[in-house]
Image (cartoon, rainbow, N blue to C red):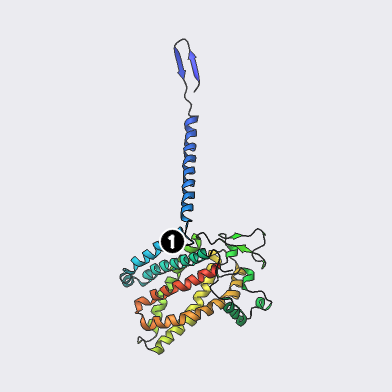
């Protein structure tokens, strides 16, 4: 603020706006600083552990279970209006819960857990005739899983700088934080397959006779397990490879060669009995949600294989 004197009693004051302009970036810097401090404090609180599981895991689980509980009272009404919309809501909630459980299990143990026992996994590879297993190079050697964590931008890598496709690369993954992207992707997959799941159950109930005899139930179960399950699992591999991890044809072919048969074998250990009970006992409007409810355990299994080494 320079001063100019004119004569004896006249003072002219010139105000400059530089300081006024500079105050605005300063205020923005203060707000940004407080925002960063708040975000850091929030992360600290959410990462606090209760029974070795972070508060964020617990909070999301409580919210999603509460939402599912409230949704059950409106399910029949929604199903009468639109079977697909009711199935979408059910799958989004259940798939979200299953991945939260899977990430909570990994957080509890603080390392990735492969839900398939090694003996069973090796048996499937021997049946498949995997050349790598014959050369004493097993599934773990590639750090390969249903989700290509070694190609995911959300994973952290070791300091050796090896290319992910090299079999000797060692990858380290965080299990003490919640992977929001993986969770949202898993729920999106539940949303996507709802457009096929609901029409598929309608097709099975329309194509076969209505009497729930053992023979007709077996026909529905065989149709479901021989047609729907292999195709849906194959496209799940494709979705996890290309969408969730940004993989390519090479990673997809490795995933199919190494993991598809073993995972499909585990599918046949669980789902035929589940679907037999489903088609024999459950009413038609509850067949899809019953399958999705049992699918919480199955989807948790798939999600845990994401984290397996």
Q: Position of residue 270 (x, y in %)?
A: 48, 79
Classify 16 as above or below 64: above
Res 149 seen here: yes
| Foreground of the two, 61 or 289 | 61
Using residue 288 as the reference point, say whether residue 153 is left or right of it: right
Furthest residue in direction right, as rendered: 135
Identify the element where label 1 is drawn. Answer: helix
Q: Position of residue 165 (x, y in %)?
A: 65, 66
Using residue 125 as the reference point, say whether residue 11 is left or right of it: left
Q: How many marks?
A: 1
Q: Position of residue 186 (x, y in %)?
A: 48, 66
Which image quadrant is residue 286 in? Answer: bottom left
Furthest residue in direction top, as rendered: 8
Residue at mark 1 = 58
Res 188 seen here: no
| Foreground of the two, 128 or 135 | 135
Q: Mark 1, residues whose alpha carbon is within 10 Å: few (<14), some, or many (≥20)?
A: some
Name the residue located 49 percent from the left edge and 19 percent from the top edge.
3
Name the residue located 56 percent from the left edge and 77 percent from the top edge.
262
Using residue 190 as the reference point, say whether residue 114 is left or right of it: right
Q: Position of residue 81 (x, y in %)?
A: 32, 70
Q: Quadrant of the C terminus?
A: bottom right
């Amino acid at each position: 603020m320079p001063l100019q004197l004119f004569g004896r009693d006249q003072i002219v004051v010139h105000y400059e706006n530089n300081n006024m302009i500079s105050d605005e970036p300063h205020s923005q810097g203060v707000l940004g600083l407080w925002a960063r401090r708040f975000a850091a404090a929030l992360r600290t609180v959410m990462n606090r552990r209760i029974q070795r599981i972070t508060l964020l895991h617990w909070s999301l689980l409580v919210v999603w279970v509460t939402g599912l509980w409230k949704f059950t009272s409106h399910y029949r009404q929604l199903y009468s209006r639109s079977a697909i919309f009711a199935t979408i809501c059910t799958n989004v909630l259940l798939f979200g819960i299953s991945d939260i459980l899977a990430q909570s299990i990994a957080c509890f143990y603080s390392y990735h857990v492969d839900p398939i026992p090694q003996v069973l996994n090796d048996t499937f590879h021997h049946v498949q005739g995997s050349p790598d297993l014959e050369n004493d190079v097993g599934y773990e050697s590639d750090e390969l899983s249903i989700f290509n964590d070694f190609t995911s931008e959300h994973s952290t890598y070791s300091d050796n700088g090896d290319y992910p496709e090299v079999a000797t690369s060692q990858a380290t993954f965080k299990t003490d934080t919640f992977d929001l992207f993986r969770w949202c992707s898993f729920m999106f997959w539940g949303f996507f397959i709802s457009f096929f799941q609901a029409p598929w159950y309608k097709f099975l109930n329309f194509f076969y006779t209505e009497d729930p005899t053992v023979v007709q139930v077996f026909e529905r179960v065989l149709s479901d397990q021989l047609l729907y399950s292999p195709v849906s699992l194959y496209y799940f591999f494709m979705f996890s490879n290309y969408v969730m991890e940004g993989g390519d044809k090479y990673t997809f072919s490795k995933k199919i060669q190494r993991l598809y048969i073993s995972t499909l074998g585990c599918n046949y250990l669980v789902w035929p009995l589940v679907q037999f009970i489903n088609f024999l006992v459950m009413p038609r409007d509850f067949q899809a949600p019953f399958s999705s409810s049992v699918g919480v355990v199955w989807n948790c299994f798939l999600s845990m294989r994401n984290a397996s080494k």
